[in-house]
Amino acid sequence: MDAMNPAASEAAHFRYLMAIRGWVRFPALIAPGLLGALREELDECYATWRAIQLRNGVAEATDGTLHHLAGRGGAVDRFLAGLPLHDEITGFLGGGPYVLNACGAYLNRPDTSAYVGRIHRDVRGFSAPYVLMINMLVMLDDFTEENGASWMLSGSHHHPDRPPDEVFLAHAERNTGRAGDVVLFDSHLWHCAGVNRSAAPRRALTIGYTRPFVKPQMDYTRMGPEPRDEALRQLLGFNARVPDSLDAYYQPPERRSYRADQG
């Protein structure tokens, strides 16, 4: 590594660990005040999200989950607007702009289970070595083995097939850490949430970022007003919208809904 350039050395270290292990944890990136606001927002939102899950008959598989929290103007949007690890995400996704693919949370409540407790990866297809997506996990509580810290199978992002349960459990590592830590991982990586055997929820944000031409899981541009913050506009896909008419298509570059730098 380049001892004369600490930033270059850190970037090289990140690239190496992502290539070999497929995940990297960054300690103490989130300020206590924002952590508290994020926890409070998730707790307030859960009753509303849960009512929708129950109403639509998907309660069993989604217990403790909240999907598509962005665009509401609260603590989650404040976190996204001041996004940590922007340079690392940009470099991993090829050096250009990126957009939000999904922004959710998992409460991992004691003695409950959801689909995130099954061995899975967060992209259905396998495009390696070309990467389309990177995941971010934001620890809002301490992650311990007792309260269900995630299992991460290092190196499995190079393999298209789901590992057998016995192989996964024999070789996966526990993703333990402190509230405020942030983990980036290759979306091809096989992983799962652990079982929470404590007395309190273990909360985390679960976020995915993609190259702009990848279709997001939710059309954030139609969910709420267009944000004034330019970083949030980019992240929510306002610079990568598909035009809906010929009039919208035939526009000068600066007024196009899909900007030229979006890939």
Image (tube, rainbow, N blue to C red):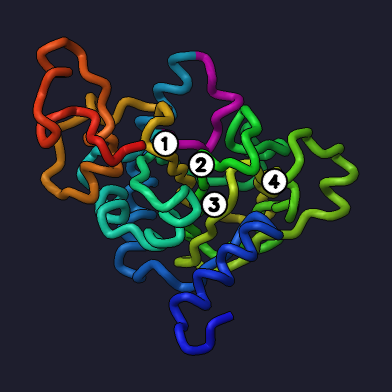
Q: Which label was assigned to residue 101?
A: 1
Q: Tags 1 and 2 in contact by the CB under 8 Å rule?
A: yes
Mark 3 / mark 4, whichever is N-terminal:
4
Residue found at x 62% / y 58%: 18
Report the mark closest to the observer, 3 or 2. Answer: 2
Q: Which mark is residue 26?
A: none
- Location of residue 147 in the rendering, given as x and y in whole percent from the top left corner: 64, 57
Write down the residue under mark 4.
157
Kind of residue at disc 4: His
Residue located at (74% from left, 35% from top): 160
Question: Can I make out residue 31 in this image?
Answer: yes
Does label 4 or label 2 sit earlier along the sequence? Answer: 2
Q: Which of label 1 and label 2 is nearer to you?
A: 2
Q: Amino acid at mark 2?
A: Met
Disc 3 residue type (three-letter): Pro
Point out which mark residue 201 bears.
3
